[in-house]
Image: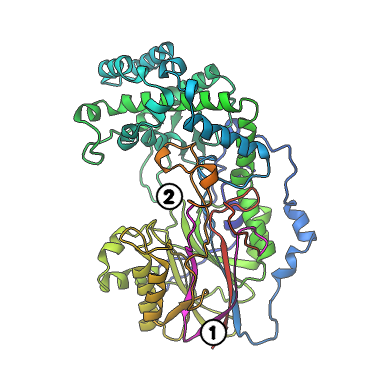
Amino acid sequence: AGVQIFAQMCAIKGEVPLGPRGSKISEPLERTESPYDPGMIFAPSPLPSPFPPASRMFLDGVTHALGPLRDGQERKEVHVVSWNVAAVNNNPFEYWITHHDPAYNELMDGVQDFLDHPGERDVGVHEVFTDKMFNQLLCDMIDANISGLKEVARLWRDDFSQRKIVSGFLKDAEIGKKRLASMPDRITNTINTVGGGTQRRPTVINFYGGELSTMSSWWSQWRAFIFQCEVQVFKGKNHKGPIRPQVVYELFDPILQSKYPAVTQEEEAISIPLQILCLAIFDAVLVHMMLSVAPETWQQIRESIAQAMLLEKERRTAHILMDTYCDADVLFLQEAPGAVNECELLTALSKKYFKLSPGGIDGKRDQNSLVLCSRSTFVKEGVLDITEEVLVTLGQLGNGKTKRSYVHGDLIACTLQDKEGVMFLLASFHGDTNGFSTKPIIEAIHKTAETSYPNHKLIIGLDANTYKVHSDQHQGVDDFQDFLESAHMTSCWGAGVDASSPTTCNARTHLQPQLNKAIGKKDRIAKADKNMKDWIVFNQAQLEPSATAKDNTGKRHFIDNMVFPTMQFPSDHAIVSTVLSWK
């Protein structure tokens, strides 16, 4: 279970990492070490896995799909699947999930009640993070030669220690605006290290595997992590030169007033020790709350989520693709981790598909768009990566701003042919959060196809990040549909696209640093991010869709008004599939 996320699906033997247009593409991807530190990993769940071992999958019939799909028949259609597999979130509690154990809902109800109606539980910060703990923290910062401690000690004495843990700290809007807890949490929550390792801060809101059953045990582990743990932070495969080891506290950056205007100049000057103090208080309050709400069960629940969402995510993802969608000719994937390793499931998948990926896959951000092509349908030789050509067209169309904001790894576009000699231009794309890069990118792909590859069948699988209502903040579904029609394109959803038919349904809980974004249990459906974000787009003169479906179970079935991911379905995006027939 200690392999890298999505390794079992993505590390395809003999895969095709794409080089510059026209270059030979044959190098296998580099192997990496396991990211899981044995001392920080959760033990296997005592519950039986709902998924059989890879060897049993072969015996149970997965390999029936590994041969030619239409041997001896002329191809007239392709089965296409698009899925944002959504890289693992570091915080297992950040979003509501559908969990089979009633204790999960009891825990989350307890947390919400603690925060919404704290009453006498809203004790002083100094009763949870004590003066003794602060003095120990102060000594640690003195030993680390951190400056600004006199002022931080004054702020502790006169301000922070006098606050209430809920109303005065967790719910303080100014702390949120100044990023005094969320910024250091983002930096230290889960640290990816050189060699594929991972170091996690002792906190409630990550997959830390240590025992946090008492405040004293948490505090000793927290201090050791911040002031003794030495890391070499992974900076991406393209990083040149040595990476010096750093103690975790050295990773903290100043919070600048120029970027966060709520921060005063005085706070900016002492922002590093101030962040350390606020992070310590934040984590202490969370541990205190969990020990108050569900002392016997909260770590077991977190472990079960880790088992499903982290340790078995790659197995579950691969299982769905290999079993439920084993008849697909093309798999468009978005936000796929770039890490690769050899394994049984990987070997099985590689017999069915070869992988097309961006030339310099983004290992640091670890969210990449990929195309997996059926070996029985397509010819691996002669594949051309035209991603850069599309980006050049993007600039020529006057979308320089979109090009500058484009994040490497979000797009892969390539040309290839099937075994019948039919030429294809396939692209997988992940849009920005608000969806405003989607139309310019699709326009650039379409223009490139129209100008340079007019005889290629154009198919794009994408997470467009489109929303029910169009505004100056979000790209709307209907506006995107109008754009497609104006470009003589269409989608798997057809002309009568229903903007209220979502492919996502997720909502933040109260167990994350930005409580202003939290949604309570009773509103987790009504106020969820329920939007149609996932599409399969193509040239309407070339192809027509049939059997279009969405799936949030992994079983070719969609359950309405259910938050996902679930313990069985590992993504917060539905799978979209369709059959495209020649016109």
| The magenta segment | 528-556
Disc 1 + disc 2, Cβ < 8 Å: no
Q: Nearer the viewer, residue 346 or 470?
A: 470
Image: 549 above or below 290? below
How packed mark 1 is, by other alpha carbons closer than 10 Å (few <14, some 14-19, many 20 or more), is some
Question: Circle 2 sits on which residue?
Answer: 365
Q: Residue at x 41, y 15 (%)?
A: 126
Residue 392 in the magenta stretch? The answer is no
- Label 2: state its secondary structure: loop
Q: Amino acid at mark 2?
A: Arg
Image: 362 above or below 475? above
The x and y percentages for residue 3 are 60, 45
The x and y percentages for residue 217 are 55, 19
The x and y percentages for residue 423 are 50, 82
Distance from Cα at disc 1 to Cα at disc 2: 35 Å
Question: Circle 1 sits on which residue?
Answer: 422
Residue 531 in the magenta stretch? The answer is yes
Q: Amino acid at mark 1?
A: Val
How packed mark 2 is, by other alpha carbons closer than 10 Å (few <14, some 14-19, many 20 or more), is some
Question: Left or right: 192 with respect to 347?
Answer: left
| Placement of the C terminus among the 4 image quadrants | bottom right
Q: Earlier in the sequence, mark 1 or mark 2?
A: 2
Q: Residue at x 45, y 42 (%)?
A: 518
Q: How is the image coloured?
A: rainbow
Residue furthest right in the image: 59
Q: Residue at x 62, y 55 (%)?
A: 317
- Label 1: state its secondary structure: loop
